[in-house]
Amino acid sequence: MGLGKRRSKYGAFLDRRNIPQERIREITKLGRDTLTRVCNNPSYYPNGTSMRKLVDAARKLSGENVSADDFWPM
């Protein structure tokens, strides 16, 4: 975390809360490549189903009421 790599809003959110990507992957059952793209590529937009899983996992692990708009402007 914080190794100078570019992060998306979702990846930065996880970093600020010390939530490992692997934990998100376990909860969402998304592939490692997909999760890497979501966390590192600011211009990547996951499909609707994946987006819903990612937001639900972020809510569960952070305890915050976040929405998809917080990470991917619609």
Image: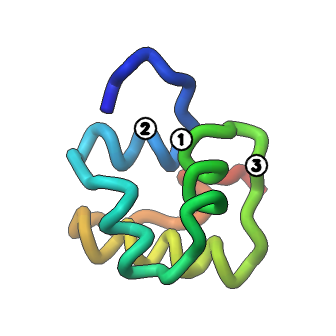
- Name the quadrant of the C terminus: bottom right
Horizontal side of residue 72 vs 13, given as left or right: right
* Residue 39 image position (x, y, % from top left): 54, 46
Q: Are marks 1 and 2 in contact (CB under 8 Å)?
A: yes
* Residue 9 image position (x, y, % from top left): 53, 41
- Amino acid type indicated by mark 1: Lys
Q: CA distance from mark 1 to mark 2?
A: 5 Å
| Numbered mark located on residue 12 in the image | 2
Q: Are marks 2 and 3 in contact (CB under 8 Å)?
A: no
Horizontal side of residue 36 vs 60, given as left or right: right
Residue located beneath label 3 in the image? 44
| Numbered mark located on residue 20 in the image | none
Question: Residue lying furthest top in this view?
Answer: 4
Q: Are marks 1 and 3 in contact (CB under 8 Å)?
A: no
Of the image marks 2 and 3, the number of the one nearer the N terminus = 2
| Numbered mark located on residue 9 in the image | 1
Query: Measuring 62% from the left and 53% from the top, which residue is drawn there?
Result: 38
Q: Nearer the viewer, mark 1 or mark 3?
A: 3
Q: CA distance from mark 1 to mark 3?
A: 11 Å
